[in-house]
Each structure stands twice: as structure tokens, then as C-alpha cells.
Amino acid sequence: MGEASGIWSEVEVAGHACQVFEPARPSEHGFTVLYLHCNRGAKLAGYPAFTREFDRHGLRVIEPMSGQSWWTDRAWPTFDPSITAEAYARGPVMDYIAERWSARPPQIALLGVSMGGQGALRMAYKYPQVFPTVAAISPAIDFQKRIEEGVDPGLDAMYRDAEDGRQDTATLHIHPLNWPRNQFFCCDPTDYRWHESADRLRMKLWSLGVPFDCDLETEAGGHSFEYAEHMAPRAIGFLAERLERERLRI
């Protein structure tokens, strides 16, 4: 396959930088991906596998830059003293998507990697009518581990202790009667830090009878962007297929 011909650029939304991708041939149905970045803040423009898949499926993308916010609804002044990362994504960023591309739920899917993967799942579980379609690669679900280890100043500032953090993890936001209709998550089995919590999420969804797709068996580099790029076709293909399913459902 040839290189993608879509274009990445940078815009400012409510005082914060966002990366934006315009595919060569955008979906005629306005399908858009809101991507939540990882803890390293690595910009997707630097990872060709993602760009190729967005271009292939005609998906517009916006990637807000929030630093090490963990995409929570807790105040973290290093990001912004007046709005949380979650509220920023749900508010100004969604408004920008509507204004620029005339896209509104359910035309918008969530996608995230690592820190952003757990953030995408948590937002979808909290607001399934806004985000009925979500995919997460290597989601760092049980982030309270980083509080226990004292290795994340941002989380330490946002939560009183590890238990306070655990109560706000994606798994504890699942509602047995109100969940995103389309969800996919994956984690490399050699990802020693995060695979266990992804498997725990799988078991909880299964026990509640909540439909989901997941891949917790594929090995492709552990917790790394090598793995993320390997899984990009699966995750982004899932989003494209389910966005179309949502369109036909209306």
C-alpha cells in the first residue's frame, strides 16, 4: 500500500493545541475520531500505521494535547486551572468538531492508547449516549498502581490515595444497563503492567452480559508503540465498521 495522502495540521481549541487530520477523501457521513493520547504525549502524526488507516477509512481525527492529565475529570492545573481534561474533550473539542466538520454523536468515535486508552473507555462508560463507539489499545486501566508506586505527580495531585484513584477507573464506571454499544480493547499479554486489568475488564463485561470485542492474545512488542501500530488496523477498522453500523441504526 502507498503512503497516506491525508494531511496533519495543528489548531488551537480554547487555548490548547490540538493535532488535526484531514483524510484525502473524507467519509461522506462525517465520521470522526477523537483520539486521546498516551502519557508520553506522542503525536499520532509520527506513527504512519495510524495515519494510513485513518486515510483508508476516510476518518477525520482530532487529537487534543493535555499532557499527563490521564483524561480525568479531576482538576490538574498543569493542564488548565479552570477545566479538566475530560470536560475539555467533551466540551470545547466536541464543539469544535461540530463547527468544523458538522459531526455530532453518534458520528464521533473515541480512540486511545495507554493513558488515552483508559481515558477513552472511561468516557465511553460514563457517557455512552455521547460515545457509543470506542476502541482502546494497551489501556492503562488500573492507574492506581502508579499512585501506589508514587511515580506520577499528576495522579498524586488529583487523587487522595490509590483507593480514591481506583474508584475512578474505567472498570468501576461500567453501568450494567447503560453501556457503549460498540467497544474494542486490546493488550499484549507480555504487557506485565496493564494486561491483568484489561483481562479483569473483559471478565466484568462478560459477567454483566455487555457486548464487546477484545484481543488479549496477540503479542507484538509489549507496552509499546510497536504494538500500537501493529493493532492500529484492527482498532481503526473496528471504529469505521461500527460508525457505519451506528449510521444505519438511526
Image (cartoon, rainbow, N blue to C red):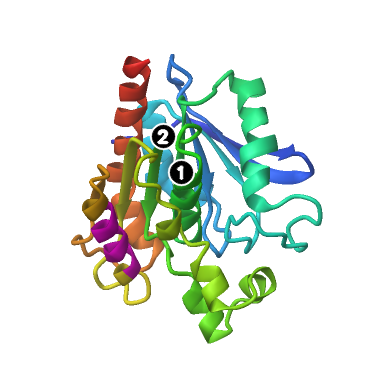
Question: Picture coordinates of residue 106 (x, y %)?
Answer: 45, 26
Q: Amino acid at mark 1?
A: Ala
Which residue is tagged 1?
Answer: 124
Q: In the drawing, does residue 133 fall left or right of residue 237?
A: right
Q: Foreground: 206 or 7?
A: 206
Which of the two residues, 248 or 64, is positioned nearer the viewer here? 248
What residue do we see at 43% from left, 59% from top?
Answer: 172
The residue positioned 60% from the left and 76% from the top of the image is: 152
Give the magenta range: 197-205
Q: Quadrant of residue 211?
A: top left
Label 2, on which residue?
Answer: 132
Q: Is residue 201 magenta?
A: yes
Point out residue 42 in the picture as x, y percentages from the top left corner.
Answer: 54, 58
Q: Helix or strand or loop: what does disc 2 sit on?
A: loop
Kind of residue sitting beneath label 2: Pro
Q: Is residue 42 magenta?
A: no
Q: Is residue 150 above or below residue 198?
A: below
Can residue 3 be spotted in the picture? no
* Residue 228 vertical position relative to residue 247 in the rendered view, above or below: below
| Dominant SS type (magenta) | helix
